[in-house]
Image (cartoon, helix red, strand yellow):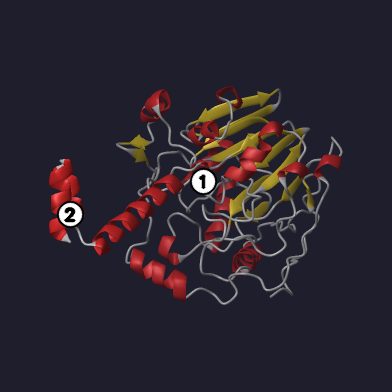
Amino acid sequence: MLKQKKSFCRKFRLLPFFCAYLSIPKSMIYALIITLLVFTTAYLFMHSKRFGALPKGTDKQQIRQSPHFKGKSFANISPTPSLTEGSSFTGVLYDFLFKRGRRIHPTDFLPVVKTDLKQLAGDQNVLIWLGHSSYFMQVDGLKILVDPVLSGHASPLRFTTRSFKGVDIYTPDDFPDIDYLFITHDHWDHLDYRTVKALQPKVGKVICGLGVPGHLLRWGYQRADIIEKDWNEQVSLREGFTVHTTSGRHFSGRGFKRNQTLWMAYVLQTPSRKIFMGGDSGYDSHFAAIGKAFGPFDWAILECGQYDPNWKYIHMMPHEVVQAAIDLGARQLIPVHWGKFALSKHDWDTPIKTVSKEAAARKVSIKTPRIGSVLDLDTPDKPTPPWWTDLK
């Protein structure tokens, strides 16, 4: 057979490399084809629209001018390793796969409430938590949406990191026109392609950190509708409304390359109140610095879940959440980043139980609304019962 192949090559003067190909065993050829297909599929998947796009050209030049862009990526103010000293990636992966809590997902359906957002009175000052770090606010007539993830998952693969049963009660069609869409950073549980794309016709302006517009532009947003900022900058929204961008202690990235976009938190000053809209962050001195510069705050919205001692520098531990609220000078604390996705190995309700207990011990007022219910920002003394108490 091999002689026949070589004779075939000589007769038709085929290229040498093709003749060499004919001499390769079929099993090796099949393995090469399969490998090529796998790499091609992975490449196409990683370059699909859901991943967005990294900044290019003049956008990249602007980023390099930021004092927070160090060498080839953004950096936190304080040294911030991804893993705590003594932890390893293999150890964390093993714990995550085999030592997760038995109740990382609730067995019961959560007792959500669906408020008709389009029927809110124009003079109502409210916050509606949508689960995890997504929330809608109407404050002094301004309509704001923060980190909406409404697609039912928080990963590039729809069958992974699924939301808890029954919590996805809102779709993009349920929202009124949004004056400002705030994005704190580009992780999958904060920036969702399907949600943000569907909301585009309703969004007036987007406020986000450096580099994040690369994703939005690929998804069809217009540059004129995006306000891109570094830390420690100011945005005037309209008369009486100002936003100050502030730092966090975290990281960014939707693929293998980290920290090409900037993670943010925001100070929102309205005619009647001041609100701290925190993104993901480990605890550090920046909370006290923000409190000194802009506090005290009427409301502080802070992450409280998906923590672990193995990555304590990029997500706060429960007692640190309460300390951060104290550092900010917050009159009311609203804990978020829980109640929808399981991104750590603790039980689904451990964050809110622990933070509530710590807040009570330190006399910090805390508000814990149900998903979809109305939290009246004009009545901060009205209690919010612990609705998770009897759930499994």
Q: Which is more toward the observer, 376 or 31? A: 31
Quadrant where the N terminus sits is: bottom left
Q: Tell me the quarter of the picture where residue 196 sits.
A: top right
- In the image, is 180 to the left or to the right of 188? right
Rendering coords of residue 156 (x, y %):
51, 52
Contact, mark 1 vs mark 2 (Cβ under 8 Å): no
Rendering coords of residue 219 (x, y %):
56, 35
> Dot 1: within a 10 Å radius of its alpha carbon, few (fewer than 14), some, or many (20 or more) residues?
some
Rendering coords of residue 82 (x, y %):
38, 55
Amino acid type, label 1: Ala
Q: Which residue is mark 2?
A: 5
Q: Is residue 159 in view from this perspective? A: yes
Q: Which residue is mark 1?
A: 288
- In the image, is 92 to the left or to the right of 360? left
Amino acid type, label 2: Lys
Q: Which is more toward the observer, 5 or 159? A: 5
Q: Is residue 206 above or below residue 94?
A: above
What element does badge 1 sit on? Answer: helix
Q: Tell me the quarter of the picture where residue 10 sits.
A: top left
> Dot 2: within a 10 Å radius of its alpha carbon, few (fewer than 14), some, or many (20 or more) residues?
some
